[in-house]
Image (cartoon, grey):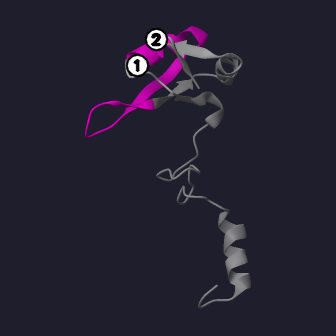
């Protein structure tokens, strides 16, 4: 600890917690701060085919329960899919049921 004592740093960590990349009140993985999101209802979808857009992702996963969001990530400069996205469910039970089986969109297995 440059310019201060070790105990001072420990006290600050105990007071404010340990926010890895999330800023004050952070979300953990480099978020913009604020309250953390409920990760028990949000899943990562990797290995998406280039033919998959938000609508197709929403349509596929809505059969498991009510969705609050379905988003495919696109490259800003090329407009092409980056091959992954996120799906958020209204309740944790639907999210858990999705994780119990394998999935395919347009004949491509997704993670």
- Residue 27 percent coordinates (x, y): 56, 49
What residue sits right under mark 2 in the picture?
Answer: 106
Quadrant location of the N terminus? bottom right
Residue extending furthest toward the bottom? 3
Residue contact at pointers 2 and 1, CB within 8 angstroms: yes
What residue sits right under mark 1 in the picture?
Answer: 52
Q: Secondary structure at mark 2?
A: loop
| The one of 95 and 25 positioned closer to us in this rendering | 95
- Mark 2 or mark 1: name the one nearer the start of the chain: 1
Q: In this rendering, would 31 be left or right of 98?
A: left
Question: Residue, x 40% and y 19% (percent of image)?
Answer: 52
Question: Residue, x 57% and y 55% (percent of image)?
Answer: 25
Q: Secondary structure at mark 1?
A: loop
- Residue 58 percent coordinates (x, y): 46, 16
- Residue 45 percent coordinates (x, y): 54, 27
Residue extending furthest toward the top? 63
Q: Which residues are magenta?
A: 55-83
Near mark 1 (Cα within 10 A), the count class, few <14, some 14-19 or many ≥20, is some
Q: In this rendering, would 82 be left or right of 44?
A: left
């Amino acid at each position: 600890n440059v310019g201060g004592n070790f105990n001072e740093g420990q006290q600050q960590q105990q007071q404010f917690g340990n926010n890895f990349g999330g800023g004050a009140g952070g979300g953990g993985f480099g978020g913009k701060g604020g309250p953390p999101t409920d990760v028990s209802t949000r899943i990562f979808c990797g290995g998406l085919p280039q033919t998959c857009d938000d609508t197709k992702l929403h349509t596929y996963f809505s059969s498991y329960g009510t969705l609050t969001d379905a988003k495919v990530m696109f490259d800003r400069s090329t407009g092409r899919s980056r091959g992954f996205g996120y799906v958020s469910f209204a309740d944790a039970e639907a999210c858990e049921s999705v994780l119990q089986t394998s999935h395919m969109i347009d004949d491509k297995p997704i993670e």
